[in-house]
Amino acid sequence: MATTTTGLKQITLPELKGKAEPDWCPGCGDFGVLAALQKAVVELQVEPRNIVTISGIGCSSNLPGYINTYGMHTLHGRALAVATGVKLANHDLTVVVTGGDGDGFGIGGNHFIHTMRRNVDLVYLAMDNQIYGLTTGQLSPTSRLGMKTKSTPFGSVEGPINPISLALAAGATFVARGFSGEQKHLTDLIKQAIRHKGFAFIDVFSPCVTYNHDNTYPWFKQRVKKLEDDSAYDSSNWIMAVEKSQIWGEEIPIGKFFQRTDIPSLHEAEPVLDEGGPLAHRRLGISPLIAQELLAELM
Amino acid sequence: MKYTFAVSIGGAAGQGVATPGNIFARIFARRGLYLNAYNAYQSIIRGGHTFLTIRTGPEPVTNMGDRIDLLITLNQDTMDRHLGLLGPGAAVIYNGDSIKPGATPEGVRLCPLPVGELSKNSRNKVEQNTLAVAAAMNMMGIGFQALEEVLTQQFKKKGDAVVNENVEVARAAYQYATAHFEAFPHPVPMTDHPKAVLTGNMALAMGGAAAGVKFYCAYPMSPSTGVLHWMASHARKTGIMVRQVEDEIGVINMAIGAAHAGCRAMCATSGGGFALMTEGLGMSAMIETPVVVIDVQRAGPSTGVPTKTEQGDLWQMLGAGHGDYPRVIASPLDVADCFQLIPEIFNVIDKYQCPGIVLTDLLLSEGTAAVDPESLNFNVEIDRGDLITEAEANGANGYKRYLYTESGVSPRAIPGVPGHMHTVATDEHQEDGVLISDEFTNPIKRREMMEKRQRKIAGIEAAVIAPELVGSPDAEVTLIGWGSTKGVIEEAVELLNEEGITANRLQIRWLVPLHGDRIVEILKNCERTIIVENNYSGQFARYLRSETSFVPDGHIRKYDGEPFMPHHIVEAVKEQLGGRTKLSVPMHEIMV
């Protein structure tokens, strides 16, 4: 993803504070994701007015209101579709999509798959807490088999989806997993995702301290293991990434699973954008010469 | 009665009804004639029964009419279905080797072509279609050269051999017709002004290009897919980003994203796809990002009859999406209007920052017309309203995206503009965009923001023109219609007047806002009012009543999938004038 740096004045953390205070529960994992995103923007010095932060609906989807960039708080599950439109209309913008596991993998699952196959140049931060929080605690697409929630009081008989394996299968060109409790690591992943020219997906463990008593901070802290600490791991190796994505249990890998940089993103591949700059700034209408040609086709 | 000539071609899907249809259309339009073509077909790639009627004349031709002058049957089925419906003076051309005519109405001329003999010199199996077209040209009094030119153009991609073969076979049939078939008494005329031939879907797409659409996306759905096809094939030439999206939910959300970033964005679908878009439509209204959605109606409900026409989606459009919000709904009146309406509605919705719906139907969208090229004017006014696309000289301290204004319209800054950063939200929000839905709700601010959005409706109403009565104000009968029925109602009015029943008409183009007061003012002075619409329950009649309390004297409705023909309306009016009924449902006599 293109970054726009300012030569004039430094972007600082305070100016990235949004108009509203987060209304997340105290201790919510989403605070850590917001902080890491703001730090990544400061460290990369991306001009905030050239960022559009786009979300769906859910606790984590309130994030655009808490960061001082252009923002869109859209419909449940639709953020990636809206974001694709924004990016294609003005590919000079840096587009960051945030949302939860229900928003992205449940109701928005279709858009998730297709945005990956299209390699739209944007960052997608899925704040994954394995539960529906804003609706007060129901099963989510990433809730574990057997999990007891308000909608599965006797334990779920459905297994979860694996967002990392799904992303790899769907052709995502940057696939990573972060943990809200690992700030520096997460900030670094987001920076890499912003720099990546193509679809960059980060599944971020963002514990829900109110409704998910299974997947807690201590639960994750005991298990997460950074891929970056494994010198034998090669994130350009798709097969290795798929194998690694299947590991879940006493050890849960986090870090960059996979990245490829050899295929163009959607706006780079689209010939209509070859010249003339972003669509949003082009002159409207049809020139008399083209109009004449279009009419001639009908005669 | 004005001169028209109608030729119908029938066969199974895959037998090549379209090619002779295109040849006739090209030749008529080049002779400076208007035309209307309606193709009755099924959702099948091979088989079924396809029946194309092309009606032409020196004055505007707006519908398929009541009479077939020349029938070309490509198979026995077509002969069996249609021969009995021909009237005196009509002729039928068919393959005499393989098709048997059966009982022939009096005064109908049978013109069998010895296809085997005429095509015996051909290396390939020659299409009987070319032979039939050539014989038809001869009988219509059109010189062979016109056909030769069009055949050459039609087949040039397939190489000289195919061109020559078709031209030679055509010449043989043309000569055969000279010797064996009697020509029609009046040759098809000519004028000095060649016409442009296009479908309603092409017109909608071209209207979008003219309006400055830079982003078009869609999911294929009959009968709207033609818009996608034109857009995709002209994307590079016109600089329009065209995307095929995974579903209609994605379509409208992607279009809104592009619109929010500053493009004029448009999408098209049919009722089923529109159903998926309704939540997105509400987002357009709530975040105040304008988008145009075209709904091309087909016979519903549910999957319904995908290849048949209806005006059954009006209430779907009126009620689309939950909650109250301003929207604009307009229904183009003819193929040229499909082009003209798009720039108009974009100017309205850009100014008032709300969703715009273009409500048309299969009859127009897949119908073909020859129109004056001047009616397709790309040099249109483009007014984007209060749109901030670059930093203002005086800065933007305290920019509020949803600033309260008298008009309800707040200046809209697109992402990237310095000093205007804000977050738009589908949650209710206050002037600066901050939510008043979650942590803090506020009845006073909620009321103010609702009223701000709804205030736009008054401006929208003033921005679109009210409908007008056409014809003598003291006529015995006033026919009221909306959208695509304009052409057939116009002709029914002419026929009634010729028969001594004075009639006038009122056609509605802007459905929301309706200008109900003006409509009532017109209708209250009319002697007898009859609403004509292509649906079961009288959706427009019910809408008009809900908005104005106006109740018409009668209704003419049709919901069999086929469009009205002029005589359906004429006979229904007579039936109602005779006091026999207040609700006429004409029977479609042609089995297609």
Image (tube, rainbow, N blue to C red):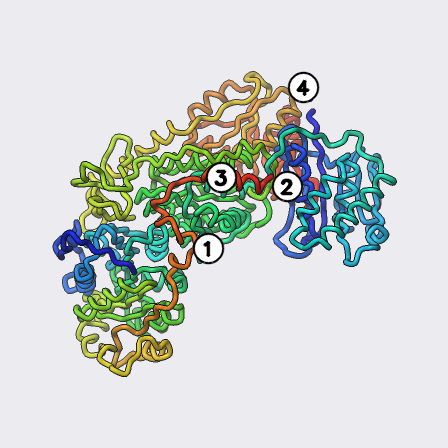
- Give the answer, above or below, for where A30 lies relative to B454: below
Q: Nearer the viewer, mark 3 or mark 1?
A: 3
Disc number placed over residue B210 in the picture, else none:
none
Question: Observer-nearest residue: B291 or B440?
Answer: B291
Q: Respond whether the residues carrying marks 2 and 4 are from the same subunit.
A: yes
Neighbourhood count class around disc 2 (C-alpha, 10 Å): few under 14, some 14–19, many 20 upward: many
Question: Mark on residue B244?
Answer: 1
Query: In the picture provided, is A159 more to the left or to the right than A136?
Result: right
* Disc 4 residue crowd, few under 14, some 14–19, many 20+, Cα 10 Å: few
**Identity of the amino acid at label 2?**
Tyr
Q: In the rendered structure, which disc, 1 or 4, sits on the residue that comes first in sequence? A: 1
Which residue is the extreme one toward the bottom?
A232
Label 4: element kind: loop
State the CA–CA distance, disc 2 to disc 3: 32 Å
Protein chain holding label 3: A
Q: CA distance from mark 1 to mark 2?
A: 27 Å
Mark 3, other Cα within 10 Å: few <14 / some 14–19 / many ≥20 = few
Of callouts 1 and 2, which one flags the residue occurring earlier in the amino acid sequence?
Answer: 2
Is B408 left or right of B192, judged from the image as shown?
left
Residue appearing at x 61%, y 53% in the figure: B43
The residue type indicated by label 1 comes to: Gln
Marks 1/2 same chain: yes
Left or right of residue B569, residue B460 in this image: left
Q: Are marks 1 and 4 in contact (CB under 8 Å)?
A: no
Q: Which residue is mark 4?
A: B500
Disc 1 element: strand
